[in-house]
Image (cartoon, grey):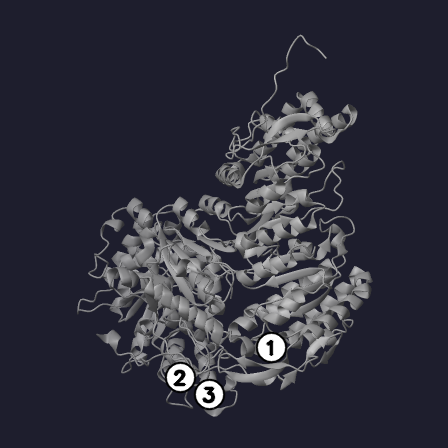
Amino acid sequence: MPPSAAPALPDVTASDQALRRFLHGLPGVDAVGLDARAAALGTRSIKTTAKAYAIDLAISMIDLTTLEGADTPGKVRSLCAKGRNPDPSDRTAPSPAAICVYPDMVRVAKESLAGTDIQVASVATAFPAGRASREVKIADVREAVAAGADEIDMVIDRGAFLSGRYLKVFEEIAAVRECCERPSGGAARLKVIFENGELATYDNVRRASWLAMLAGADFIKTSTGKVAVNATPPNTLVMLEAVRDFRASTGRQVGVKPAGGIRTTKDAIKYLVMVNETLGDDWLSPRWFRFGASGLLNDLLMQRQKLSSGRYSGPDYVTVD
Amino acid sequence: MSTDRLSVLKTYKLFVGGKFPRSESGRVYEVTDAKGNWLANAPRSSRKDARDAVVAARKAFGGWSGATAYNRGQILYRVAEMLEGRREQFTAEVAAGEGLSKAKAAAQVDAAVDRWVWYAGWSDKIAQVAGGANPVAGPYFNLSTPEPTGVVAVLAPSDSSFLGLVSVLAPVIVTGNTAVVVPSESAPLPALSLGEVLATSDLPGGVVNLLSGSPAEIGRPLAAHQDVNAIDLAATAGDAELARELEVAAADNLKRVLRPEARADWQTTPGTDRMLAFLETKTVWHPMGGLGAGGSSY
Amino acid sequence: MTNDGFHGQNGVFAYAPAPESRSVVDIAPSYGLFIDGEFREAADGKVFKTLAPASEEVLSEVAQAGAADVDAAVAAARKAFTGWSALPGAERAKYLFRIARVIQERSRELAVLETLDNGKPIKESRDADLPLVAAHFFYYAGWADKLDHAGFGPAPRPVGVAGQVIPWNFPLLMLAWKIAPALACGNTVVLKPAETTPLSALFFADICRQAGLPRGVVNILTGDGATGAELVGHDGIDKVAFTGSTAVGKEIARTVAGTGKRLTLELGGKGANIVFDDAPIDQAVEGIVGGIFFNQGQVCCAGSRLLVQESIHDELLDALKRRLTTLRVGDPLDKNTDVGAINSAEQLARITELAEAGEAEGAERWSAPCELPSNGYWFAPTLFLGVSQAHRVAREEIFGPVLSVLTFRTPDEAVAKANNTPYGLSAGVWTEKGSRILAMAGRLRAGVVWANTFNKFDPTSPFGGYRESGFGREGGRHGLEAYLEH
């Protein structure tokens, strides 16, 4: 078991039954109240200096992502170039936190980003469905880590979770976590993707959050971006509450990454407001909060240009990569 | 006059908490028939009797209001059944007290029995008529239900000692309230006899408490009593000054006040007003959520 | 560590001021009384000033109605009653629909006005008060031609002229609650807004004018308690409707006694918000916060007593305190303000006095650190911990942002404590156990019970109290009863 896997709560992970008792003993989530709270936070009005701050913060939190069957080394290099220099017309624009690719593209991304702070994140464990044997998933992770991935975005076995085999999910996360260790020391940071749209209820999202954190996740992530419902403000809010409560119980801080469907500056700012008012400053950094997105970056850049120039920008004034 | 047997006279007593006490004051007053002939001595209740009756009524409220509507209906119907077998006694008491012919008195008693039956049937229907679901503009289930207001002081009509009494008492208790009743001062005997019927009708003790005496004397402490939730001023019809005085006293704890009607008609089948006067509407909200993390607000 | 070199900024995400523009509302330097379709000065020429409680700035000067003005307004309403009550319901409905639409059109203006005159956050006047005001008129508009089906007999008649006195906490919403059902049923009204918040009612008079409402159907008399007493005591009215304090409500009940005037009262409360150990905690915290800090706690149905199961007391209080540190107190016109100004110096003094009593009686006082503006009337959101039923802060309505925290061990104890008050307006229950919700809802002696939510309002939902919280219901089908003879 990895060192950070919550030794504070060892007995709750001993069996499916023990895990069920623990996870089902977490406070329930009232869906209407949760939706209302997320919507209320969405009405915050973020203007002028606060908006400028939020835009740059949001850009710095992006995991700029390409996860397509048609990905090529050229496409990945182009995305990395965008990461290195998001706005050619304004060098003060910050870079995103990471470039997120499939495992076979990690090496290309790593080379393209050499000399920058930009992390390379790789999805793994038979992303996005996760329907493969443990061995295949582990091999997937090992390949990505060996290729130099700084971060691993794994998917949980939703089938196991929904059928109550919590221990299987727990052990798989713990096993992946072990594979994130590098022989040279250090470890890739592990993001655990739940696919909230498939877990279906907020109670499940809260349980999955605790399960992943107990198993050693460094980050918990809403979704793959490949199903109909991805990150939403309320399902992300449940996860923010979970990392807050987990740190209060165990002392260990875990990051949160909403992914999929966050396309506009307005959306991104709503998420930052949620982080700010649920977790506070401690999480307002790319180390603890990320956006899994691609199109979002250009909208943030256009808004950034508008703030500095005073006029509205257009899609031809940001680069398409 | 028959001489072979001396009749056994009844000592009329109060009905409080399911028991038949005398007035704590030890006072009685002469009840006469319409021609002034002595009928009986009735207890003249005091403010302390009123106090005791309110305690009994309050104590009974939880159980009675918590009983199922079906159960309350059964008990009210049982009252009608018990009365049916004692029609002659009540007819005689009404005839004597109100100076009515036997036929007219019998009609009053029959109507009173029928009124119990009528109200008995309301027990499990009034909530459907007076309550219901409210279609609020949001993800909430919202339901209004009528609930009994609590302890109701009933100053029963002075001119209709039995039918009037039943007409004001049944609507109070059918919905789960408990009652402290001051019957007609001049003709209290049917009311006191009704206590004997109620005591044998499975009605829990304290649900109905009967205090004979002066409505003005007993009404004042009841109107001012902080643990009485509502008051029916039927007895004050024709005494505007007393009605005003009691309504002013009732304002101290904001009792629900049912004012007297100028010309009450006890014969016609009533509407729901007398029940609604002593019902509170409680509205309960509960979220009716989407089923989860899936389709959300954005 | 390779992961540490992030280039993002680390700083405080401080929201810049986001003020709503005042320019959408044009407040005249003075206003008269609205009688018989026209504005006129008070007969004796008396006026008083209305302030912005957030700044103590004088917003306008309004007429102080006296006995002669009450006479004139009641006479105008009586004269208008004949025609208005004889109109087909469908025609009355159309007037009310018009009013609802004009309110929607002017809702931004009215929200800013309400926030200026009352001190409540623009977020609330914009997202709660104004939408509910318009919805209330829409709802009752639809009843005007359907009264035969409302369950009050085949052809229910209007009561006549209604004298209506409303409070300052939701000035326009309380006006809507009073005027919409009265007009739908065919009554005419004389309404007196609260002394400290007269402006939105005067703007409503202008809305009546825009909607073409016949003269005298709605009359607005500004003034103080003396004006209100003149109105409810006036022989020419048939019906009194009052929302306000229990003390004044009792006084009105005494005034009305023996007159035969119909009466409905919506008065004070000391609502219990009951949190069980199996509650959805995060939503419960929001419900507690909304329950007592919405509108600065100046809400008759506020959840001003938190009854928390002892087993989760510490956990819940930690969460609650953490949440209170994120409340933004300040300029009510700032769109990000959560808690605005107290409505008046008088109200602030009352809150202050009761809070001091709470401390003196030994309860532990806690407030999140917050800077209050130097002008205006302000009170920081406050908790009192370790409160018992005997404390004044547990018994008396504070009508301010002050929450008394008590504990219980069992459901029976929760019910007993919740009901242990002369009031009976609202209660909250938080538990994930359905059977317990229904059992609790059944036993709580309160006119509205919010289960796993709090402070929700809707025009279709009857609202009103048990016991000393008043009688009669406003909203829904039930709300028609007060304005119909049956």
In front of the other: B148 or A73: B148
Which of discs 2 and 3 lies nearer the camera? The answer is 3
* Residue B43 versus residue A194 in the image, above or below: above
Residue occupied by mark 1: C108
Q: Disc 2 marks which amino acid?
A: Pro
The residue tagged 3 is A307
Q: Residue at x 60, y 56 (%)?
A: C461
Q: Amino acid at mark 3?
A: Leu
Amino acid beneath label 1? Arg
- Chain hosting mark 1: C
Residue at the top extreme of this rendering: B4
Circle nearer the N terminus (2, 3):
2
**Residue extending furthest toward the left:** A184
Counting from the top left corner in percent of width and height, residue A291 is at 39, 72
Point out residue B230 in the picture as x, y percentages from the top left corner: 58, 47
Q: Quadrant of the N terminus of chain B?
A: top right
Q: What distance separates the C-alpha of mark 2 from that of mark 3?
A: 16 Å
How packed mark 3 is, by other alpha carbons closer than 10 Å (few <14, some 14-19, many 20 or more), is some
Judge left or right: residue C179 versus residue A55: right
- Residue C265's disc is none
